[in-house]
Amino acid sequence: MEGMSERAYAAHSGLSRGAVQKARKNGRLVLFADGSIDAAASDARRGAMTDPDQQMRSRGGLGSSSDSVGLGGNNVSGPGETSSYLKARTALTVYQAQERQLSIQKKKGVLVDRARAETLVFRLARQERDVWVTWPTRVAALMAAQLSAEMEKASGAPVTLETAILQRVLETHVREQLDALADLRVSLS
């Protein structure tokens, strides 16, 4: 006998005898003329014709962690590692579940688009600022008239308050307040 028997090749390759018989039947083994198995040529042919993950699963191995490459705490398996397909499938399933959860949160209104929220906050702040900048112009004449009437009533003498002066004083104080508020920064991170 030139080569190995099925039992010897099974022990050599780490496969079960049934797996060796199946490989022989499917033409994945190289045989000598006497029917014995050419181990070196059969290993090469099986390696070329069989998925490495399938070979590892058929041997019952789990692949070594030294073949893995760490990425952010997760092991990504290399070729021939048993769990590479399972890890990829699990990662895909986790990603899809997270994507569905984010979609549900958006629909419920729990999650909002950050860029849109920042734009809305900026627009609201600008509108408020514009209202306050124009406020002294709108109320200065009314305030001057009310103050003049109150002072005239209290003193009994006619009092005239200059509207332009009151407007300048109000504008100065409003601008100081707006400058103080301008230092306030909104962070949505």
Image: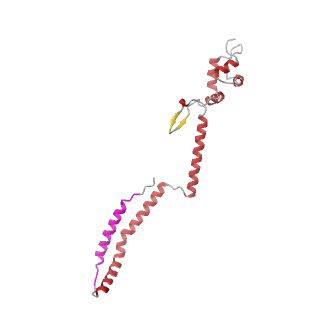
Q: Provide residue 47's location: percent of width, then percent of height.
A: 62, 24
Residue at the top extreme of this rendering:
1
Point out residue 166 in the picture as x, y percentages from the top left corner: 30, 75
Q: Which residues are magenta?
A: 159-185
- The image shows a total of numbered marks equal to 0
Seen in the image, is 173 located left or right of residue 61? left
The answer to whether 63 is drawn above or below residue 183 in the figure is above
Q: Would you say 75 lies left or right of 174 here?
A: right
The one nearer the camera, 115 or 67, is: 67
**Which residue is painted at 34% across and 68% down in the image?**
174
Against 132, residue 95 (above or below) is: above
Q: How is the image coloured?
A: secondary structure
The x, y position of residue 111, in whole percent, is 53, 55
Identified at 40% across, 63% down, the residue is 126
Q: Name the image quarter holding residue 4.
A: top right
Residue 135 visible in this rendered orientation of the protein: yes
Q: Main secondary structure of the magenta part?
A: helix
Please provide percent x and percent y for residue 109.
55, 58
Q: Nearer the viewer, residue 168 or 87?
A: 87
**Residue at 35% over, 79% down:** 142
- Rendered image quadrant of residue 146: bottom left
Q: In which quadrant will I find the N terminus?
A: top right
